[in-house]
C-alpha cells in the first residue's frame, strides 16, 4: 500500500464530495444543523408552560408564590382550580402541563422559622406539591426545575426575611446563625410525575445527539463503493495497481476530516447555544471522537462493500445507525431497561459507545479510567471493521 | 504475451436458477507486439474475455496467463503493465480532464517532470489539449472515449486491452482513434481491441471471431477471407427480397447476405456466373449487375455465424 495511492484516492473522493451540493450540505453542516434543529425541537416548549394553581391555603404568602412562579419565563400561570379533580381535568385536556398545589398551612409554615430548629429531618418539607405532565420529558424537566427553584427561592427568602426581622428585634445572633445554617438543607417538595417517570434533560440530550448525528459520515460513506459500480468507474479503478486497502483508506480520509470538523463545531454549539457543560479533557474528547468517527466509517464501509446498489447501501446503513441509534443508544430510553440479548447487540453498535462517551465526558467529566470498556469496543469495531472490509473487498467486478 | 487454455466463464443467475456460459473453452495465444481484434456481435463474450485478461473477473474454467502471470491466481501482478479501457466511460464525470489525468498519474506512479510532459503529450495526441479544465461528463461521447484512452496510456502500458473503444463514436473520431492505435502498435505495444465493426477488424494483425461464447475463427484477415468455402457474387436487382428467396432455394447456393442495395451470393467454388444469370432470368429476375467479387471479412463471418446457428455443435467442433 503506497501513501501516494491513498492520497490520490482521498483527493479524488474529496472532489466528489465538494462538487456535489447535497454531499456538501449533508457532510459539511448536516450534523451541526441536525443537532441544533432536533435539540431546539425538543426544547421548544420550555417557555410559558401552562400552569394551574390549586390554592388550598389562601394566605398572602401563597399569593406571592403564585406571582413569583408566573414571573418566570418558563412558567405561565393560566388559572386556578377549586380541587384536585379539576386539576386532573386540566392535565388530561392538555390545558395545563403543571399543577402547583399549595396545601393548607403553607403561608404559616414559611413564617415559622423555629420549626427549622425542631426538625431533625434531612430536608425541609413544605406544604407544597407539584403534578407534572411528563409526556414531553424535556419540557417537563425544565418546567419542574423552574417550579422547584422558584419555590425554594421563595421559601428561603421568606424565612431569611423573618430571621432578619428577629435579629433586628434583638434576638440571639448565634441562634439566628444556626437557623440560617438549617436553611442550607435542601427543600424536599413532593413532585408527582405523570405519564413518564424517567425525565431526561436537554443537557443529557445534546451530547447523545452529537454521537447520533456523527453517524452521518458513516451513512454517506456506505455509498462510495456502490456509486463507483453504478457509475461504471469501478471497472477502471480495479484494473489499476492500487492496493485495495489504499482504496478503502483513501476513501475514508475526507469523511474522517469532515467528521472531525463537525465534532469541533458541535462542541461549540453545545457549549454556546445550549449551555451544556463540558467537564472532561478536551484532547481526550477529540481523540475519542476521532476513534468513534472511524468506527462508524468502518461499519459504513462494510455496507458499501457488501451491498452493490448505492440506494440499498444507504438504506441499510440508515437502518443500522439511525433507528437503533435513536432508540437503543440510551438517548431516550436508558440501555439498562433492554433485555440482555438486545443489550449484547447494542454493544456492537458504535453509537451506543459514542453516546456513553459523549455523555460521560460532557456531564460527568469521565476519562480513560471510566470509559475504557467503550473505548475498547470502538477500537474493536474500527480495527475489525476495516480489516473485514479489506478482506471482503475484491478488486473484481463479479 | 497472452496464453489462454480452455478459458471459460460461467455466470450463475441466482434468481432463475440457471447458469449462463459467457465464454466457452477459449484457447488462444497472442504474441508480444500483436494488434489483435476480437470481433463479434453483442453478447458474444468479448467483454467477458477482456475482463478476465485484465484480472478483474475470475475465470471459472481453464487458465489465462498474461505476461507470464496466471490472472486467476495473481491478478495484481499484471496491473502495472496493463492499460485497460472499459466499454463504458470509466473515468470520473465530476472531475476535470486534468484531474482525471492527475489521478491516473498518481495511481501509476508517474511523477516528477515526466508527469506534466506525458499528460501534455497524450492530450495533444488525442486532441483534448483545449479541454483540460472541462469536467468529464461535459465532454462529448467521442472525447470521453479519447480521454479514457489517454488515461490508460499514461504509464506506457506494454499491454493494452480496449473494449469497444469506438462504439458510439462518430466516423471521423473513429478514424482518428484508429490512427492512434496504429501508432501505439507501431511503438511495440501489444494491443487487444474488441469491436463490432468489420472495417476495424481489417486493420488488425489477427482477428478472432467470437459468437455465443465461442472463438469460432482466429487468423489473419487475409487467411480468414480464404476460409470462405465458395465464390462470392454481388447481385443488384429490382426486387432483392424476392431474389434472395429464389437464390436460397437454388442448388449450389450456400448463403445469401443482404447489404443494402445488393446481395452477396455465396456459391460453391467454380460456379458459372452465366448459368446463374440464366437461372435468375428463368425465375423472372433481371440482374442489373452481377459480378464476382473478392470475399470480405464480413461475408465470411456471417457465413460462419449462420452455419453455427444452424448446427452449433458441429460448427464449434470444426
Image (cartoon, coloured by chain):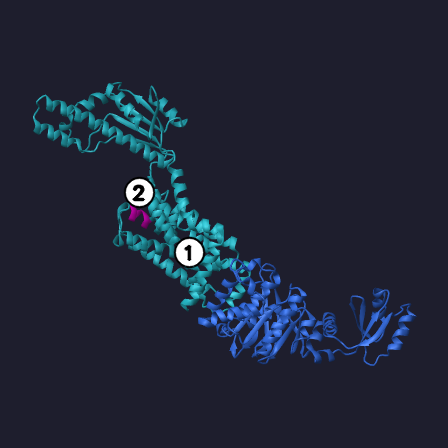
Chain colours: A cyan, B blue
Q: Which of the two residues, A391 or B35, is positioned nearer the viewer here? A: B35
Circle 1 sits in a helix, a strand or a loop, which is it?
A: helix
Q: Position of residue A182 (x, y in %)?
A: 15, 31
In the rendered image, the vertical position of residue B207 relative to residue A21, given as above or below: below
Q: Which of the two residues, A145 or A109, is positioned nearer the viewer here? A: A145
Q: Is residue A359 magenta?
A: yes
Quadrant including the N terminus of chain B: bottom right
**Residues at marks 2 and 1, common chain?**
yes
Residue beneath disc 2: A276
Is residue A251 visible in the rendered image? The answer is yes
Q: Is residue B171 magenta?
A: no
Residue beneath disc 1: A255
Splitting the image into 4 quarters, where does residue A48 fall?
top left
Quadrant including the C terminus of chain B: bottom right
**Which portion, as a residue range, is magenta?**
A356-362
Q: Chain of mark 2?
A: A
Amino acid at each position: 500500500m503506497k501513501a501516494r495511492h491513498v492520497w490520490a484516492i482521498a483527493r479524488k473522493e474529496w472532489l466528489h464530495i465538494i462538487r456535489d451540493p447535497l454531499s456538501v450540505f449533508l457532510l459539511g453542516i448536516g450534523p451541526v444543523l441536525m443537532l441544533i434543529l432536533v435539540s431546539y425541537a425538543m426544547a421548544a416548549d420550555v417557555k410559558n408552560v401552562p400552569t394551574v394553581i390549586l390554592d388550598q391555603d389562601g394566605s398572602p404568602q401563597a399569593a406571592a408564590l403564585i406571582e413569583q412562579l408566573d414571573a418566570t419565563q418558563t412558567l405561565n400561570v393560566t388559572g386556578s382550580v377549586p380541587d384536585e379533580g379539576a386539576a386532573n381535568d386540566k392535565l388530561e385536556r392538555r390545558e395545563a402541563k403543571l399543577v402547583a398545589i399549595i396545601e393548607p398551612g403553607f403561608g404559616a409554615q414559611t413564617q415559622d422559622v423555629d420549626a427549622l430548629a425542631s426538625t431533625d429531618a434531612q430536608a425541609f418539607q413544605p406544604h407544597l406539591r407539584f403534578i407534572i405532565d411528563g409526556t414531553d420529558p424535556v419540557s417537563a424537566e425544565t418546567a419542574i426545575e423552574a417550579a422547584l427553584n422558584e419555590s425554594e427561592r421563595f421559601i428561603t427568602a421568606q424565612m431569611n426575611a423573618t430571621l432578619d426581622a428577629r435579629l433586628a428585634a434583638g434576638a440571639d445572633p448565634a441562634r439566628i446563625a444556626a437557623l440560617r445554617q438549617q436553611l442550607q438543607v435542601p427543600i424536599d417538595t413532593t413532585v408527582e410525575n405523570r405519564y413518564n417517570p424517567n425525565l431526561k434533560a436537554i443537557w443529557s440530550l445534546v451530547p447523545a445527539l452529537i454521537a447520533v448525528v456523527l453517524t452521518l459520515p458513516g451513512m454517506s460513506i456506505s455509498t462510495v463503493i456502490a456509486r463507483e459500480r453504478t457509475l461504471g468507474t469501478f471497472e477502471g479503478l480495479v484494473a489499476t495497481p492500487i492496493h485495495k486497502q489504499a482504496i478503502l483508506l483513501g476513501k475514508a480520509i475526507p469523511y474522517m476530516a469532515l467528521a472531525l470538523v463537525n465534532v469541533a463545531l458541535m462542541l461549540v454549539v453545545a457549549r454556546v447555544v445550549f449551555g451544556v457543560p463540558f467537564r472532561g479533557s478536551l484532547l481526550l474528547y477529540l481523540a475519542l471522537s476521532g476513534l468513534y468517527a472511524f468506527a462508524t466509517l468502518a461499519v459504513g464501509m462494510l455496507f458499501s462493500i457488501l451491498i452493490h446498489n448505492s440506494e440499498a447501501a444507504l438504506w441499510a446503513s440508515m437502518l443500522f445507525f439511525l433507528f437503533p441509534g435513536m432508540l437503543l443508544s440510551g438517548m431516550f430510553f436508558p440501555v439498562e431497561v433492554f433485555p440482555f440479548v438486545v443489550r449484547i447487540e447494542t454493544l456492537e453498535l458504535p453509537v451506543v459507545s459514542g453516546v456513553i462517551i459523549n455523555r460521560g465526558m460532557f456531564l460527568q467529566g469521565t476519562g480513560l479510567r471510566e470509559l475504557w470498556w467503550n473505548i475498547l469496543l470502538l477500537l474493536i469495531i474500527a480495527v475489525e471493521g476495516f480489516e473485514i472490509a479489506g478482506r471482503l473487498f475484491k478488486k473484481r467486478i463479479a | 504475451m497472452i496464453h489462454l487454455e480452455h478459458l471459460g466463464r460461467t455466470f450463475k443467475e441466482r434468481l432463475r436458477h440457471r447458469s449462463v456460459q459467457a465464454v466457452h473453452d477459449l484457447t488462444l495465444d497472442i504474441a508480444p507486439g500483436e494488434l489483435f481484434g476480437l470481433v463479434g456481435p453483442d453478447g458474444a463474450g468479448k467483454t467477458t474475455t477482456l475482463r478476465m485478461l485484465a484480472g478483474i473477473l475470475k475465470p471459472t474454467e481453464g487458465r489465462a496467463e498474461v505476461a507470464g502471470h496466471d490472472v486467476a491466481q495473481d491478478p495484481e501482478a499484471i496491473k502495472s503493465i496493463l492499460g485497460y479501457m472499459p466499454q463504458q466511460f470509466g473515468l470520473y464525470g465530476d472531475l476535470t480532464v486534468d484531474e482525471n489525468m492527475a489521478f491516473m498519474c498518481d495511481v501509476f506512479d508517474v511523477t516528477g517532470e515526466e508527469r506534466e510532459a506525458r499528460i501534455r503529450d497524450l492530450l495533444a495526441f488525442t486532441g483534448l489539449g483545449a479541454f483540460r479544465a472541462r469536467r468529464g461528463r461535459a465532454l462529448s461521447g467521442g472525447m470521453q472515449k479519447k480521454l479514457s484512452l489517454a488515461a490508460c496510456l499514461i504509464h506506457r502500458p506494454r499491454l493494452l486491452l480496449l473494449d469497444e473503444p469506438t462504439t458510439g463514436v462518430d466516423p471521423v473520431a473513429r478514424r482518428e482513434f484508429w490512427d492512434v492505435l496504429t501508432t501505439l502498435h507501431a511503438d511495440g505495444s501489444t494491443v487487444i481491441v474488441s469491436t463490432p465493426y468489420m472495417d476495424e477488424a481489417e486493420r488488425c494483425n489477427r482477428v478472432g471471431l467470437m459468437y455465443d461464447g465461442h472463438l469460432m475463427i482466429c487468423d489473419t484477415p487475409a487467411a480468414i477471407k480464404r476460409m470462405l468455402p465458395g465464390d462470392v457474387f454481388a447481385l443488384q436487382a429490382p426486387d432483392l427480397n424476392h431474389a434472395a428467396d429464389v437464390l436460397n432455394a437454388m442448388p449450389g447456393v450456400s448463403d445469401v447476405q443482404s447489404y443494402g442495395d445488393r446481395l452477396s451470393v455465396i456459391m460453391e467454388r467454380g460456379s458459372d456466373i452465366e448459368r446463374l444469370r440464366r437461372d435468375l432470368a428463368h425465375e423472372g429476375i433481371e440482374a442489373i449487375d452481377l459480378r464476382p467479387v473478392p470475399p470480405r471479412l464480413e461475408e465470411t463471418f456471417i457465413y460462419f455465424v449462420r452455419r453455427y446457428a444452424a448446427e452449433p455443435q458441429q460448427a464449434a467442433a470444426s
